């Protein structure tokens, strides 16, 4: 769909957020140029490859490249010729607080171009930044560097994104909300007009700080729900004949969470999203919650709840090992199969993956580790002679006596069928509760109380 006034867009940063955003705007009819300092990444895109594994990205590159989507390392001319620049560079956590060096550099680069531009330019911050960053850090950098005034010569907006890896294109094309913060009416109105092709979406117009806050509160909310489910699971694990899945199912049927209609039960998506497991990872939840905690501390506000969310999550991958030790108290030399390296299915992202924490702990106990992930074939930054990367699920099953599932890849659902055809009954510890315990001879899932799995073991012994 083409808008009446179709401004030209540049996106600084061609990672998950930047590239997906750029491609989705191109899909909606805009002319978009994605800029990145990484020549290798831009080269890949220009050869019609995605720099990361994400469904739909290659197809959109193929569809729009050099028609209304362009990728380049050239910054000056691209920004000069555009009307709007989205900033979508990384904002990592440096161990103590959010690292703003990339975003400061990107904004300074944009400012040095708009210094020589005669027309109004809008800058929209997509990167996740703590409340106040756009007004108190970014704005002074741009005003100083460009020698121009916000609200007059250029506009400045905060426009956080809410896409999930693995469903990034879908989330971006069908957003559940669009949050537009801004320093003034003109910039907010202009940014809202860009989103006209997403007309069905709920739009929140607010100030920059509130927009920035919505993003952090949103990620913290879901991370809190996950740690809540995990803490309940951990308690269930020590209660005879209780399975956390039954407990959570009972909770979610509350009419405040699920609505009974004549056509049946309507359950919001989050009731399917929140599942007990071996913990959350990725480039967002762990870093964003730590950044929010550090921000609150600066303001002398206590963060007991979020501290707990992080603490539960840091320990959760190790629950898998604690559960394993109930069956194998001594891990030295035990052949253990690890299923899943990515922090979640349908992505090749291993940042803060719970698997990494468990691998380190298992390697330190001299277990023999066999690892399989359908997409991530090896860990470049993790070298250990005890780790063997196997080519497929069958080879892993053949090699091991225990299997630990860390990522809910669809392919792993084949496990019960493959096991049925083998004369082997490895113990399966399901860290994502993705398999039905009835389908596996020796099954243990996170959050299952002792008597239940004992009965499984006794079934085996009969
Ligand atoms: C998250 C948010 O869901 C997005 O709304 C947000 O835009 C994004 O961060 C971001 O800030 O950019 P993402 O990290 O891609 O998205 O993935 P999620 O699907 O939310 O999963 C995060 C982690 O939680 C994964 O490790 C997943 O396995 C884990 N998880 C999720 C659980 O451990 N249990 C659950 O019940 C659900």
Image: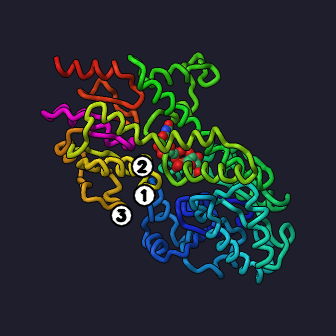
What residue is drawn where x is 45% and y is 24%?
236
At which x and y percent is residue 61?
A: 49, 64
| Occupied quadrant, residue 104 | bottom right
Q: Can residue 11 be spotted in the picture?
A: yes
Q: Secondary structure at mark 3?
A: loop
Instruction: Tell me if 93 is positioned left or right of 112 in this view.
Output: left
User: To which residue does mark 1 refer?
Assistant: 53
Residue 356 shown in magenta: no
What residue is drawn where x is 79% and y is 62%?
135
Residue 427 shown in magenta: yes
Q: Can residue 171 be spotted in the picture?
A: no
User: To which residue does mark 3 refer?
Assistant: 380
- Quadrant of image for the C terminus: top left
Q: Hey, which residue is sitting farthest left in the picture? A: 423
At which x and y percent is residue 301?
A: 73, 45
- Quick check: is the Cβ at mark 3 less than 8 Å away from ligand 1? no
Q: Earlier in the sequence, mark 2 or mark 3?
A: 2
Q: Secondary structure at mark 2?
A: loop
Q: Is residue 219 above or below residue 238?
A: below
Magenta segment boundaries in residue numbering = 403-429
Q: Secondary structure at mark 1?
A: loop
Render colour scheme: rainbow
Does the residue at mark 2 contact the one at mark 1 (Cβ under 8 Å)? yes
Q: Earlier in the sequence, mark 1 or mark 3?
A: 1
At which x and y percent is residue 192?
A: 75, 55
């Amino acid at each position: 769909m083409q808008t009446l006034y179709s401004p030209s867009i540049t996106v600084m940063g061609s990672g998950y957020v930047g590239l997906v955003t750029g491609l989705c705007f191109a899909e909606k009819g805009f002319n978009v140029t994605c800029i990145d300092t990484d020549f290798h990444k831009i080269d890949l895109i220009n050869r019609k490859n995605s720099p990361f594994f994400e469904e739909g990205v290659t197809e959109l590159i193929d569809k729009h490249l050099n028609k209304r989507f362009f990728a380049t390392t050239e910054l000056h001319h691209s920004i000069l010729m555009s009307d709007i620049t989205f900033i979508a560079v990384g904002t990592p956590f440096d161990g103590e607080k959010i690292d703003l060096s990339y975003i400061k550099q990107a904004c300074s680069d944009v400012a040095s171009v708009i210094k020589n531009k005669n027309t109004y330019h809008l800058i929209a911050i997509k990167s996740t930044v703590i409340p106040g960053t756009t007004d108190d850090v970014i704005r002074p950098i741009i005003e100083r560097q460009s020698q121009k005034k916000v609200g007059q010569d250029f506009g400045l907006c905060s426009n956080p994104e809410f896409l999930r890896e693995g469903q990034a294109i879908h989330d971006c094309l069908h957003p559940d909300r669009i949050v537009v913060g801004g320093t003034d009416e003109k910039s907010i109105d202009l940014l809202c007009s860009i989103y006209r092709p997403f007309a069905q979406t709920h739009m929140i117009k607010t100030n920059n700080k509130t927009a920035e806050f919505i993003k952090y509160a949103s990620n913290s909310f879901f991370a809190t729900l996950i740690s809540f489910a995990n803490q309940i699971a951990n308690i269930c694990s020590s209660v005879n004949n209780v399975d956390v899945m039954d407990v959570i199912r009972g909770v979610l049927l509350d009419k405040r969470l699920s609505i009974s209609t004549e056509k049946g039960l309507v359950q919001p998506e989050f009731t399917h999203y929140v599942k007990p497991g071996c913990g959350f990872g990725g480039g967002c939840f762990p870093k964003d919650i730590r950044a929010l905690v550090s921000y609150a501390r600066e303001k002398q506000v206590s963060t007991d709840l979020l501290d707990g969310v992080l603490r539960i999550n840091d320990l959760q991958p190790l629950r898998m090992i604690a559960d394993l030790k109930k069956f194998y108290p001594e891990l030295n030399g035990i052949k253990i199969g690890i299923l899943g390296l990515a922090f979640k299915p349908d992505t090749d992202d291993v940042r803060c993956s719970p698997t990494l924490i468990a691998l380190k702990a298992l390697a330190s106990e001299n277990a023999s580790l066999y690892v399989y992930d359908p997409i991530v074939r090896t860990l470049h930054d993790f070298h250990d002679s005890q780790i063997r990367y196997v080519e497929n699920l069958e080879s892993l099953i053949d090699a091991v006596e225990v299997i630990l599932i860390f990522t809910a890849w669809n392919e792993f659902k084949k496990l019960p069928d493959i096991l049925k055809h083998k004369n082997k009954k490895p113990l399966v510890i399901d860290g994502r509760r993705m398999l039905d315990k009835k389908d596996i001879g020796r099954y243990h899932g996170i959050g299952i109380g002792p008597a239940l799995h004992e009965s499984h073991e006794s079934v085996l012994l009969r």
